Amino acid sequence: MNTRDILVIGASAGGLQALTRLFSDMPAGFGPTVFLVQHVTPAGPSQLPQLLERCRWLPAFHPEDGEPIRPAHIHVAPPDRHLLVRDGRVLVRRGPQENRTRPAIDPLFRSAAAAFATRVVGVVLTGMLDDGASGLHAIHRCGGLTVVQDPEDADWPSMPRNAIAHTPVDHVVAIDAMAALLVRLGREPAPERPDIPPDIAIEARIAEKELTTTAADTKKVGRPTTLVCPDCGGGLSEIANSPVIHFRCQVGHTYSAETMVQAQGEAMEKALWVALRTHEERIELFTRLADHARSRGHDRVAASWGHQLAEARSNVDVLRRVLSQPEVKDALPTAQPDGPPA
């Protein structure tokens, strides 16, 4: 008889500290198969498996693409790679970013839900924005259990709060109480496997692709919008098969609602800075043209350039005022680190 022996965990900012506390509390006799996504910088090697092994619970490692799943091990997503599972193997893929990050939590959770259904216990820990909420809902729809760190206990409460707001959550607990809960849940018998919802299976398959278009699959699970992908400029489809709305483009870039808002804000701010730089360049150009015309005695031409120079200076003043206002800065979010490199 199967038990709930598949543990999938997603963490972001503050995740290393939370994981260390959680794994240090785990008893030696409890050995589920663990898959972990911790948001890390894509550049350089990661020491996260070595750091987690100091907790003296289970062996931790970065798996290779296609290798068999190792029971009673912690499979850690490598930097700049999505961690997925299928047919008893681990898939490590450099597919399109989800929620502007790779590895992302949602692809792992959907993949595990499609592969293991009721055997899965999904856990969302501390972090910013809302990566993990959509994937946690997929676990719920496939009969798995959902656990979220109490936002009041999290160093960065956004990810737990968004998971609770958008997903039926079975347990909300502080990190110090989570180990005992996961041990109890992991020893429960898993219910009979249900039919996997087709949209979850399709989205899990999309995440496995790297250099292959996903347009045909995206059309099966989403409806087109007039929005464009902030990363590649392609059209976005809205995936609204659950309370957790997210958007996919034709090559697979995926955004949660909060991530989309952040991406649009960053694009707006970038556009304002480009406009400011362009107007400053126009000031220099008009100044040179006016001086050149004046030196040749073409006063009417110089005056015409002078009017355009004044207009450009006025535009620069407006843009500088807009960019310097605190309320505008708050409305134009910039990317935040998702925790220390591991």
Image (cartoon, grey):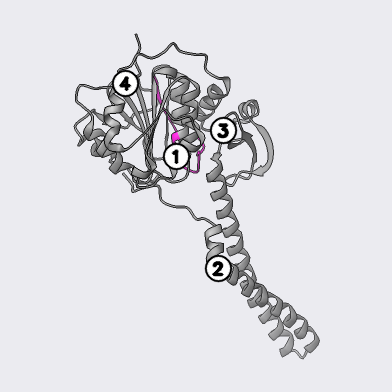
Mark 2 residue type: Gln
Pointer 3 residue: 243
Query: What quarter of the picture does the C terminus occupy?
Result: top left
Secondary structure under tag 2 reads loop
Mark before the other along the chain sequence, 4 or 2: 4
Q: Is residue 100 magenta?
A: yes
**19 vs 97, nearest the viewer:** 19
Q: Which mark is residue 222?
A: none
What secondary structure is the stretch in magenta mostly built from?
A: loop
Left or right of 214: which side holds 23? Answer: left
Pointer 1 residue: 102
Quarter of the image for residue 48 reads: top left
The residue positioned 63% from the left and 68% from the top of the image is 278
Mark 3 residue type: Pro
Q: Is residue 239 magenta?
A: no
* Labelled pair 3, 2 in contact (Cβ < 8 Å): no
Q: Which residues are magenta?
A: 89-105
Mark before the other along the chain sequence, 3 or 2: 3
Pointer 4 residue: 186
Nearest-to-viewer mark from 1 and 2: 2
Secondary structure under tag 1 reads loop
Secondary structure under tag 4 reads helix
Q: Position of residue 259 (x, y in %)?
A: 53, 45
For disc 1, the neighbor class at 10 Å (few under 14, some 14 to 19, many from 20) is: many
Mark before the other along the chain sequence, 3 or 4: 4
Quarter of the image for residue 120 reads: top left
State the separation of the CA atoms marked 3 and 4.
27 Å
Q: Is residue 296 above or below residue 254?
A: below
